[in-house]
Amino acid sequence: MSSRRRRPRATLCVIAGLAAPLAASGAHAERGLTIRSGGLSVELRRETHQYAVTDRRTGRAWITAPLKDLAVTDAEAASSERMALKLHERSTGRAFRADVRVWNGANVTFRLEADNLRTPLGRLDYPGAMRLQRDPSELSLVFCNRSCGQLVGRRDDYPTKGFWRFGNLGLDMPWTGVIDAERGDGYMLLLETPYDAAVFLVPDERGRHWPQTAWHGEFDRIGYARRVSYRFTASGGYVAQAKAYREYLRRTAGWRSLADKARERPNVNLLRGAAITWGASVIPSAIKFAEEARDAGIRRAIINANGKFPPADMERMGSFGYLVGEYDNVTDIFDGPPGFTSDSVERYAARDRTGQPYKGWQHMDGRQMYRRATWRAVEFYPSFLEGVLRQYPFTARFLDISSTIDPPRIGARGIGNRAARSCRIGASCMPRSPVAAWLWAASAARPGAPTCSTTPRAQPADRSGGRCPSGA
C-alpha cells in the first residue's frame, strides 16, 4: 500500500496471520458477526468492539481488549470471508469504515479507512490488545530493543513499557511475541507499517501484560495506510516467530542472507560469532589487546577504535581474522561546512512541525548541536568514508544514523510524503531511511569502496532519496 503514488483514502490495516489452511463459511448474528475458514473463526462482538479468534490447531481462544471509544454502528457480511463495518469514535465524532477479511489460510486482515488523508490522528489503539480468553499458563513476552533480545514474563517489572519502532529505545525488529514456553505456541505481532507506530505493554485486570499496537499521526493526521499482523504459531516458540519474520521479509523486502551478502563482500563472513569490543581509547595498547585475544583463542572479534589505529596495526589485527572498526555518528552537527560534526543547520537540520531546527546532543563544552536530516547524512557519508579509507584500512564501520525523529513529534516517513514536503522552503524534514541506527557494515577494506549496509530492505517503496550508496 505504501508503494502507491496516489492514496485516495487513509487506511489503517491490521493483519492477523494463522498457519492453518482456511476454507470458507460465514454467518451473521444480531449480537455480532462471524467469519470462518477451516480451523479459524473470527467473531465480532459489537457491544464491546472485540474480535474473538479461535484456532482449532492449538485449542486456543484469543480475544482483543474492548475498544470503548470506537463504537461499531453497522456490520454486514460482504462475503463468507469478509465483513464490512462502520465505526464511530465517541470522543471526537470521527467516522471510519473497517474491513475484516480472512484469506489465504494464514491471515485475518483488519482495515480502518478514513475518507480524507488529513483526518486528525493523535494516537489510536487498534485493534485492542490480543489476549487469551482462558489463560491458565504462564506466557512470556519476546522483543528485541536496542540490539538486545528479551524474553520476560508478563509480570516482570521491565522498566520500559512502550517501544517506538523508530526511536532511541525502540524495537530493532518491528515485532513483539507472546509465547508459551512449554507448549511452544503463541503469536507474533508484526508492525508492517512501522513508521509512526509503537507497541505498548498494557496490563489486564490481573496485572499480566499484553502487547498493544498504537498508531500515531503523521503530523497529527492519519496520512497513510497502517498495517500490523498477528502471526499465530502452533509450536516452535520464538524461533518459529523469528523464522516467520524472516519469511515475511523474504516475500516483501528482498531479504538476503549473510551468505548471499558474503558472496559480494567476503568480509561479511567475519561478522559471524564476532565478539564486539568497545573503547580502545589507549591506541598503542590495541594491538597488544588483539594479540592477547588471539592467544586466548578468540577467533572472531570486532575491535572498535575511539580514534585511528596505526595502519600497520590495523593490518595485523585483520590478519588475526578480526574486523577493525570505528564509531560513526554523523547525526549531530554544529553549523558550519560539511563535515563529520558540522553542516549547514539552515539547509540540512531536521525540522519539527513548527519549522525549527531539531536539537540534538549538547556538547561537553556547552554548545548546542542539531540533528542532521537522515537523508542528508546518508548523502554525505559515502564521500566522508572514502576519505577515511584512503588513509586507514578499516574493515568495518559502526554507522549510527537516526532513522527518524520520534513519531509523535514529526512524521516518521518524512520527505517521501506529502506532509514532509509541506515543510518550510529550505528546511529538510527527517525522512525514513533504509540505514538503521546502530548497524554493523563490513567493508571490502579498499580505498574508494565505502560501505553502507542496510537492515533487510523492509521499505522498498521509500522514494525519499535516502538510499545507501550503489553496491552497498
Image: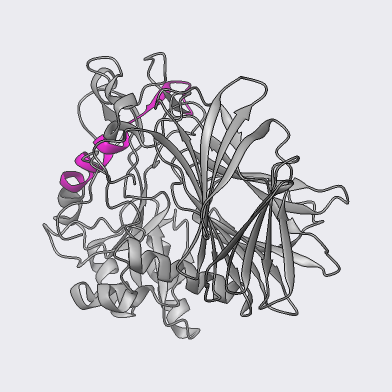
Snapshot quadrant of residue 419: top left
Residue 376 is covered by the magenta coloring: yes
Q: Quadrant of residue 263?
A: bottom left
Would you say residue 143 is visible in this rendering?
yes
Residue at 47% of width from left, 58% of height from top? 278
In percent of width and height, residue 108 lies at: 53, 59
Q: Position of residue 326 (x, y in %)?
A: 35, 55
Q: How is the image coloured?
A: one colour
Q: Nearer the viewer, residue 123 or 225?
A: 225
The residue sitting at the left extreme is 448
Q: Nearer the viewer, residue 357 or 399?
A: 357
Image position of 155 with respect to 135: above or below = above
Residue at (83, 64) in percent of width and height: 135
Whether the magenta-drawn stretch holds residue 314 is answered as no
**Residue 125 position in % (x across, y down):** 62, 38
Residue 412, image x, y percentages:
41, 35
Q: Is residue 362 visible?
A: no
Side (left or right) of 4 relative to 147: left
The region drawn magenta spans: 363-384
- Examine the rendered structure and indicate whether residue 61 appears above or below residue 375: below
Foreground residue among 305 and 239 = 239
Could you tell me which residue is drawn at 49 percent across and 71 percent down? 105
